[in-house]
Amino acid sequence: MLSQYSKKQKKSLELYFRCLTSGCIHGWMRNYYVAYEFKLINKLWWKWPFLDAFKLWELKDDDDLKKQIAWLLDDGCREEYRSLHAHLFALSEQARNKYVEVGDEKSDHAKLDVVHKCLYQLPSGNITAFGCAWAIYLSRIGVAKKYITEEEAWENKIRAARLIQQSYSSWDDFYIAFLVGNQYFSAHEGIKNYVRITAMFDLMSGSSLLFNKVKWEQPLLPH
């Protein structure tokens, strides 16, 4: 698949993929790893972002990483979130508040609380952004650590980007869905009153990169 893309298109898509993963990156190097890929020349700087990712997803080796990427692409709790969202959306406001307050034996109350409070911020109930962004990011790490080939990583990235484009019509929609997904996976009671500063926050708040150079409607097929 990778060989079918021209050098110019591959370069454009790689930047697009890095922007999609910017919500996964925090710390003082966050913007650097949106502008640039993980290269051997800066290998010493990989330590903290890689440790953060491995700790979050409880990864130990290449097999764990491959399984996690597959799960994020195939599942990523998308249906679980959508099901909770649909159930709450169908209730009246009074019934909804009572249901969330009381809960049930099947639901994680912290997650239910997130879905409830984000009901109108994310009316689609679609958190594809979170899982697919992380699938791309872990694929980037996998190549750097030689856990997967560039060809395998490219297939993962294209598949994830396609799911993302099918789900959202703009960077703004994508960012909101990513933040909601992040809150859901954090599984803490309630919504935090702050946003952890990531590279995506920087791109959306003070950079022209997303809007002037990396357009949302990136063609994913080779041309």
Image (spheres, helix red, strand yellow):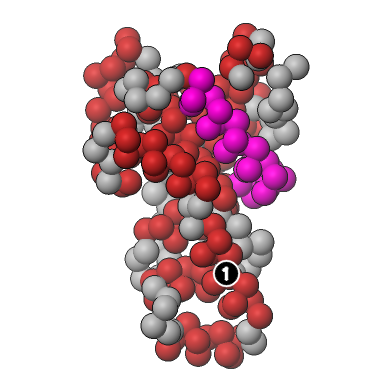
What residue is pinned by disc 1? 83
In this rendering, position of residue 124 left or right of residue 118: right
Give the x, y percent position of residue 22.
48, 36
Question: Hey, which quadrant is residue 189 in on the image?
Answer: bottom left
Name, please, the residue furthest toward the right: 223
- Nearer to us in this view, 204 or 122: 122
Asked if one can make out residue 155 in the rendered structure from this viewpoint, the answer is: yes
Q: Is residue 88 above or below residue 44?
A: below
Q: Nearer the viewer, residue 30 or 68?
A: 68
Q: Quadrant of residue 67?
A: top left
- Write down the region rendered in magenta: 151-174
Nearer to me, 199 or 76? 76
Magenta span dominant secondary structure: helix
x and y percentages locating residue 42 in the rendered image: 31, 15
Which quadrant of the rendered structure holds the N terminus? top right
Say above or below: 63 vs 94. above
Kindly identify the residue that appears in the image at 63 percent across and 84 percent down. 91
Image quarter (top left, top right, bottom left or bottom right) of the C terminus: top right
Question: How many numbered badges does the structure rendering display?
Answer: 1
> Within the image, what quadrant is residue 82 found in?
bottom right
**Left-right relation of 153 to 204:** left
Q: Residue at x 60, y 57 (%)?
A: 126
Image position, residue 30 (x, y; %): 39, 31
Q: Nearer the viewer, residue 52 or 138?
A: 138
Q: Residue at x 39, y 73 (%)?
A: 108
Residue type (three-letter) at the residue carrying disc 1: Ser
SS class, disc 1: helix
Please, is residue 86 above or below residue 213 in the view? below
Q: Is residue 135 magenta?
A: no
